Image: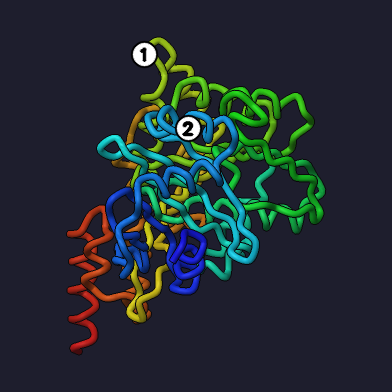
Amino acid sequence: MNFEELLKFAADQGASDVHFQSGSAPQLRIGGLIRNVESPAIDVTALRQFTASIAPQAIAEDINGAMFRGARFSRSFDGLGRFRCSLYGQRGNVGLVMHVVAATVATIDQLNLPAVLREIAQTRRGITIVTGPSGSGKSTTLAAMVDHLNETFHGKIVTIEDPIEVLHSHKKALIAQREIGTDVGSMADGIEQAIVQDADVIVAGDLRNAATVRAALRAAETGHQVFATMFNPNATQVLERVIGTVPSDEKRAVTAQLAEAMTAIIAQKLVVTKDGKRRPAVEILRGGQYTTRCILESRWSDLSSYLGSRQGCMQQLEQHLLELYQAGVISGTEAMKLATNPETVAEGLRAMRRSAGG
């Protein structure tokens, strides 16, 4: 099989990612696990040529430099769909990961996400952060929330992406999708520019540095609705991470800004269901007076307990895992494996089993 035939095979198999590495057979990620493809090892020269043929010109002209930087780009193939591509070097040779981007935007309901995400999406100001480990579906969840806004809101949505993944069509909203390196220099620059470009909603990527955090909080302070992503496993760690991103002399001011602007934090992991599919398990923290006080006073353990109160449809990850177990969707082993606090899940499982036993 040539490379495009391998991509078609991957799509037919329901793969989420395709791995090409010089000197090794292609591999697919299916259901969260890497699977080997029965195919000859990938030729070094052939992979370099294929990468150059699909990459933007600036990357194609300097493959070695792009490998060293870990360059990322998106590419569409007729009849195959869109892929997010990540380039890397491995023993001096080319490695390429191609992540399958869904051809259509799945809805909040189709993704089995909590219905309250529709309400959160329609909040007209403040900052909402979607967090979770790599491969947990953050981009898919964020795209679903943006699509919900697109269908219900007459306003302007500006996304700043690295690279652009899902292509949104205009529905009720006007959507401008800007790519770092092509349309704008950095995430922080894109947010700052969106503020003066009459944006109502700004969708940013990862809050990975102080400049991006400052820009996102300023946008929220000036009345914009801001969405962003992070890689932390739970809601309270996100708050600590945002504050920890800035220098010590800025922490107090940023803490106050975050306490005032925080609308919601959605932390998710993908669980494997009993029928072998994947779906999100979600933790939700929402803003409010108590949340604001906890952030200002760094009362992270109190905030973790508050999550379990279920007020405003908040929930701990462990609560959702236990619900999925009780509904027969996942096994107890899977619930334990994905829990941030496994003992909480273990106690819940024991209680359910005692109750079932009469």
10 Å crowding of disc 2: few (<14), some (14-19), many (20+): many
Where is residue 187, by image quadrant?
top right
Which residue is at the front of the view, 302 or 12? 12
Mark nearer the viewer, 1 or 2: 2
Amino acid carrying mark 1 in the image: Ser
- Please state the horizontal and vertical placement of residue 160, each as a whole percent of the image: 62, 36
- Count of marks overlaid on the render: 2
Q: Residue 140, labelled with which disc?
A: none
Question: Residue beneath label 2, please?
Answer: 207
Look at the numbered discs 1 and 2 and tell me whether their residues touch, using CB distance below 8 Å.
no
Which residue is at the front of the view, 285 or 321? 321
- Please state the horizontal and vertical placement of residue 185, each as a whole percent of the image: 60, 23
Badge 2 marks a residue whose secondary structure is: loop
Q: Residue furthest bottom?
A: 358
Q: Residue at x 34, y 60 (%)?
A: 26
Badge 1 marks a residue whose secondary structure is: helix
Q: Residue at x 61, y 57 (%)?
A: 77
Q: Locate the C terminus and report the quarter of the image it occupies.
A: bottom left
Relative vertical location of residue 331 with respect to residue 294 in this rendering, above or below: below
Earlier along the polypeptide chain: callout 1 or callout 2? 2
Q: Locate the N terminus and report the quarter of the image it occupies.
A: bottom left
- Please state the horizontal and vertical placement of residue 94, each as a whole percent of the image: 36, 41
- Is 204 on the left or on the right of 265, as rendered? right
Relative vertical location of residue 135 with respect to residue 196 in this rendering, above or below: below
Which residue is at the front of the view, 210 or 324? 210
Question: Residue beneath label 1, please?
Answer: 248
Q: Residue at x 39, y 42 (%)?
A: 231
Amino acid carrying mark 2 in the image: Leu
Relative vertical location of residue 20 with respect to residue 229 in this rendering, above or below: below
- Please state the horizontal and vertical placement of residue 271, each as a whole percent of the image: 35, 66
Q: Residue furthest top?
A: 249
Give the CA distance from mark 1 to mark 2. 17 Å
